[in-house]
Amino acid sequence: MDFQPDAGLDAFRDEVREFLRKNLPSDLAGKPVGSVRSMRPDLVRWQQILNRKGWGAPYWAKADGGAGWTVLQRLVFDEECVAAGAPTHDGFAQKLLGPVLNEFASAEQKAAHVPHILDGSRLWCQGFSEPGSGSDLASLRTRAERDGDFYVVNGQKTWTSYAHESDWIFLLVRTDTEVKRQAGISFLLVDLKTPGITVRPIRSIDDCHHLNETFFDNVRVPVANRIGAEGDGWKITKFLLNNEHASAADLPILRRGLTLARKLASTQRAGREPLIAQTEFALRLARLEAELHAIAMMVQRVAAMESDHSPAAHAMGSMLKVRGTELQQRISELTVEALGDDGAVAYPEPHDACLDEPMPRQDIGRGVANEMFFRRASTIYGGSSEVQRGIIAKMLFQL
Ligand SMILES: Cc1cc2nc3c(=O)[nH]c(=O)nc-3n(C[C@H](O)[C@H](O)[C@H](O)COP(=O)(O)OP(=O)(O)OC[C@H]3O[C@@H](n4cnc5c(N)ncnc54)[C@H](O)[C@@H]3O)c2cc1C
């Protein structure tokens, strides 16, 4: 692969920067994102702005209504959005469900959902994990039994990120208990307003509400909301989970974290000197920077393998997930340390705070400890590090 500067990509970067400069409202820029996703009103407003520009689906092909960008352009877009402090998008709709609809849905299903993803009027969440079925997803037990033109769904999902702020959920259900377990799974789209659905919050260690338990009690879902054939759920899930290897390391999050660590290292004082003057701290920061550069190179390699579906390409995606998420954790730990005593305080996010007065040092400390706590989960969600290592061993060494 070619690591030389790419003039076309530089011009694209300039175009994205210019767009952000002109179109990112100042009251949205730099607003705390929470660890995963912006607050719904901010996310929807930003999605509408992107959609007006024709960038409502940055990761999809043009034929599917997307921006039609290459993987490298998508990475540049993400990087510039994070650098400018733009709100996040609905990753569940954009990166997971969208490609599934484009690949497997009927024309009617696409017409029913794609326009709402583009204009931000329908936010999505992912209903895969269950108590007892996380890494071993094929063991899931939520049942969908056929009753005429409907499925009747009963069971429980857990860790459902943003179910409380979403309109619809894409759901894995068991439609057949008599066949091999993978063959008995189907993929349904469910309106969260359907009677019988209860969403209950799980408060996480960062003191935020991202997560939920979602209960289904005799929920009637039209058969027309099934994607693919009955029993295709596992095939669709494999497609969904294998998408976008290059973004597995979440490079923009790493860059954002390291920028903050660097800023604190030069503004915080250790005795009379700035923290960065301490050799030991400077060395640790430099090591993290070197690792980030190594990951960035690896991302370029994986991006160059975009249409390569070989086991090696698959394994590279898993390597990026492991390396990227472990680095996220170490950067967030160093950032907390850089704050000294103030790092020990989990300053509330503004939307979660019930404080009349800002807390002392909230200017620099806000969200830092919360982020460090939340990053414990990075090596679990989206496939734990242990499971990723298993995939690498299987793909590369046939173990
Ligand atoms: C913050 C967060 C957000 C999430 N959001 C969503 C969401 O929106 N929707 C959704 O469906 N799910 C979501 N999840 C669930 C997530 O996908 C699961 O937590 C994850 O797949 C692990 O499953 P588990 O928690 O059941 O752990 P388990 O699978 O029970 O694993 C327990 C431990 O055993 C290890 N282990 C398991 N299998 C193996 C193996 N084969 N080899 C070696 N070690 C193994 C794991 O690494 C882990 O350390 C989220 C999780 C978190 C933490």
Image: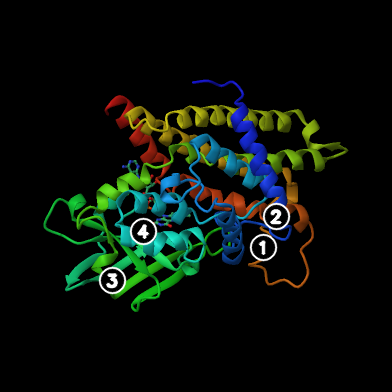
Residue at 65% over, 67% down = 351
Give me the disc on residue 221: 3
Secondary structure beneath label 1: loop
- The residue beneath circle 2 is 29
Residue at 34% over, 67% down = 190
Q: Nearer the viewer, residue 241 or 393?
A: 241
Decide which of tag 1 and tag 4 comes sooner along the chain: 4
Work out which residue is located at the far right of the displayed protein and give it.
Answer: 272
The kind of residue on which mark 4 rests is Lys
Quadrant in which residue 43 is drawn: bottom right
Circles 4 and 3, Cβ within 8 Å, touching? The answer is no
Marks 1 and 2 sit apart, C-alpha to C-alpha, by: 19 Å
Marks 3 and 2 sit apart, C-alpha to C-alpha, by: 39 Å
Decide which of tag 3 and tag 2 comes sooner along the chain: 2
Crowding around mark 3 (Cα neighbors within 10 Å: few <14, some 14 to 19, many 20+) is many
Residue 85 percent location from the top left of the image: 67, 50
- The residue beneath circle 1 is 348
Give me the disc on residue 80: none
Work out which residue is located at the far left of the displayed protein and give it.
Answer: 178
Marks 4 and 3 sit apart, C-alpha to C-alpha, by: 17 Å
1 or 4: mark nearer the eye = 4
